[in-house]
């Protein structure tokens, strides 16, 4: 068995306290073994990958041979990852551990295309959606986006949005786990020219109280017609 396979088996067995609220804490939390195996399965050597958060997944990306960036504000987690890998002679040459809050760091990371992105950092509002924008806008067509902790409302909203986008042919569900989803990006652009009205999740705004049904329907028809006209003009 190769050393990388041995390390992966150790990683999947769990019990590693990479996380902690302070440098003295040691918490064994992270992606499920099934999701970690999915990362190793789908990431190819040399792929450009990005994650918000760090831990088990960072090592999985390293084992897969990715050119990987992990953004996390907790320096002792980075040190624990480095120590775990050093003890097992796992190279972190292609891994960049960036200390900082993702909403501050991601806008300045550059615009090189990504093959795989994992959103598993701060799950507060609006950080999940900031992470999504700056990760997904760089994701190439055919690239994979994984959203973890869908039992938390912010991640659940994002998961539902991506599922609705499958109706428009922009994203496709690749794998669903108990609290994690993986989607493939099917288009080059993240936001179409039609904006919110072209997104199934947003295209049916709540009615303004007191507005008759016939007027709401007429407004929607007019709006969509106008957006189609503008979109066609911009494409010329």
Image (cartoon, helix red, strand yellow):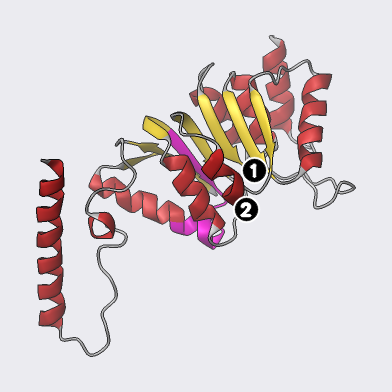
Residue visible at 53% across and 60% down in the picture:
126
> With respect to residue 138, does 21 lie above or below?
below
Q: CA distance from mark 2 to mark 1?
A: 7 Å
Query: x, y percentage for residue 50?
Result: 55, 34
Q: Which element is circle 1 on? A: loop
Q: Earlier in the sequence, mark 2 or mark 1?
A: 1
Magenta-colored stretch includes residue 90: no
Q: Is residue 230 visible?
A: yes
- Along the line of sight, which residue is nearer the eye, 127 or 161? 127
- How many numbered marks, from 0 up? 2
- Which label number is shown at residue 118? none
Q: Quadrant of the N terminus?
A: top right
Q: Residue furthest right?
A: 24
Residue visible at 51% across and 19% down in the picture:
44
- Which label number is shown at residue 53? 1
- Along the line of sight, which residue is nearer the eye, 214 or 106? 106
Residue for badge 2: 122
Q: Residue furthest top?
A: 1
Query: x, y percentage for residue 148?
Result: 55, 47
What segment is highlighted magenta in the picture?
A: 144-157
Q: Quadrant of the C terminus?
A: top left
Query: x, y percentage for residue 25?
Result: 86, 49
> With respect to residue 76, does 68 lie above or below?
above
Magenta-colored stretch includes residue 151: yes
Q: Residues within 10 Å of mark 1 (few under 14, many from 20)?
A: many
Residue visible at 29% across and 42% down in the picture:
170
Query: x, y percentage for residue 186?
Result: 31, 36
**CB contact under 8 Å: marks 2 and 1:** yes
Q: Residues within 10 Å of mark 2 (few under 14, many from 20)?
A: some
72 relative to 195 in the view: left or right: right
220 relative to 179 in the view: left or right: left
């Amino acid at each position: 068995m190769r050393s990388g396979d041995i390390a992966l088996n150790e990683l999947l067995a769990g019990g590693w306290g990479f996380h902690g609220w302070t440098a003295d804490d040691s918490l064994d939390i992270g992606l499920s073994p099934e999701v970690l195996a999915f990362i190793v399965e789908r990431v190819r050597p040399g792929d450009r990958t990005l994650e918000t958060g760090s831990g088990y997944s960072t090592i999985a990306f390293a084992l897969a041979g990715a050119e990987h960036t992990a953004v996390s504000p907790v320096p002792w987690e980075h040190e624990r990852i480095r120590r775990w890998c050093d003890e097992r002679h796992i190279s972190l040459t292609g891994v960049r551990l960036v200390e900082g809050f993702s909403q501050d760091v991601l806008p300045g990371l550059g615009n090189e295309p990504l093959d795989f992105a994992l959103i598993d950092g701060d799950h507060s509002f609006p950080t999940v959606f900031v992470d999504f924008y700056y990760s997904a806008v760089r994701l190439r067509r055919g690239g994979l986006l994984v959203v973890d902790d869908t039992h938390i409302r912010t991640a659940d909203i994002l998961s539902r949005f991506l599922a609705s986008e499958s109706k428009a042919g922009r994203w496709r569900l690749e794998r669903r786990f108990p609290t994690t989803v993986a989607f493939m990006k099917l288009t080059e652009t993240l936001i179409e020219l039609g904006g919110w009205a072209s997104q199934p999740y947003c295209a049916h705004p709540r009615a303004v109280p007191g507005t008759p049904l016939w007027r709401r329907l007429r407004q929607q028809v007019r709006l969509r017609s106008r957006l189609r006209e503008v979109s066609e003009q911009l494409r010329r």
